[in-house]
Amino acid sequence: MADDAPTTDAAPATDAPVTDDAPLEPAGQKALEAFKERARAAERESKAHQAELDKMRAELDEVRAGQLSEHEKEVEKARKEADQAARAEVSSAYQARLDAADIRLAASKFADPEDAILNLDTSGLARDESGNLDQKALTGALDGILKKKPHLAGGLTNGSADGGLLGDGVHAPTREEQLAAARKAGDVKAQLRLTTEQLADLATQ
């Protein structure tokens, strides 16, 4: 007798999975609505507080701006004045260096060109369109200094290559005359230089 085929029990039915979209019980739905309302109220209150805070900050900034405006004007004025003064100082120093260079080039008749710079007042000298010293006026002024202070001359004599002329037909003084003038003027620097030159000449003889 054939054995009967084995039978299996049918799988029990399972409930459908629960999702977030599943409807809540009336009590749960009521609680959720209450929570949402409290959240919306808190958000409205937060926005109101932020708006009030922004308003207060704007008012404070306006007050500060009003209080600092005069101070800022004074600071800006002082800054501009300092900037202008600095620019003028730099410009003046630069022009002084240019003048000194021109004087050195024109002071070939001086023993020491630095003496020409120290003794020449450039404030009254004519200048060209570029602001540089007028060469004719500069030469005349330097010759005028040598006429008043011949001991500053570079030791030209009547037998020198250019005839010892300082300008306007005036001859440069000899070293002895320069030394005498230096002693009279109390120019110790010129005296030392001229004495050194005399000694050097004697050593080569």
Image: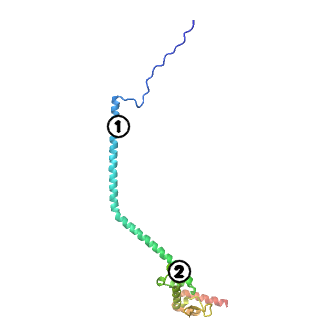
| Secondary structure type for disc 1 | helix
Q: Residues within 10 Å of mark 1 (few under 14, many from 20)?
A: few
Picture coordinates of residue 142 (x, y %)?
53, 87
Mark 2 or mark 1: which comes first in sequence?
1
Picture coordinates of residue 191 (x, y %)?
56, 88
Picture coordinates of residue 157 (x, y %)?
60, 92
What residue is rendered at 40% in x and 69% in y? 78
Question: Does residue 57 appear left or right of residue 84 in this picture?
Answer: left
Q: Nearer the viewer, residue 88 or 204?
A: 88
What residue is rendered at 66% in x and 89% in y? 203
Quarter of the picture holding the N terminus: top right
Picture coordinates of residue 161 (x, y %)?
63, 90
Q: Amino acid at mark 1?
A: Lys
Q: Looking at this view, name the residue that lies furthest to the top.
A: 1
Q: Residues within 10 Å of mark 2 (few under 14, many from 20)?
A: many
Is residue 81 shown above or below 148?
A: above
Dot label at residue 205: none
Is residue 67 shown above or below 123?
A: above
Disc 2 to disc 1, how far (Cα)? 88 Å
For the rendered model, the colour scheme is: rainbow
Residue 186 seen by the camera: no
Quarter of the picture holding the C terminus: bottom right
Residue hosting label 1? 36
| Secondary structure type for disc 2 | helix
Q: Amino acid at mark 2?
A: Ala
What residue is rendered at 61% in x and 88% in y? 197
Residue hosting label 2? 100
Question: Does residue 178 appear left or right of residue 23 in this picture?
Answer: right
Is residue 57 shown above or below 143?
A: above
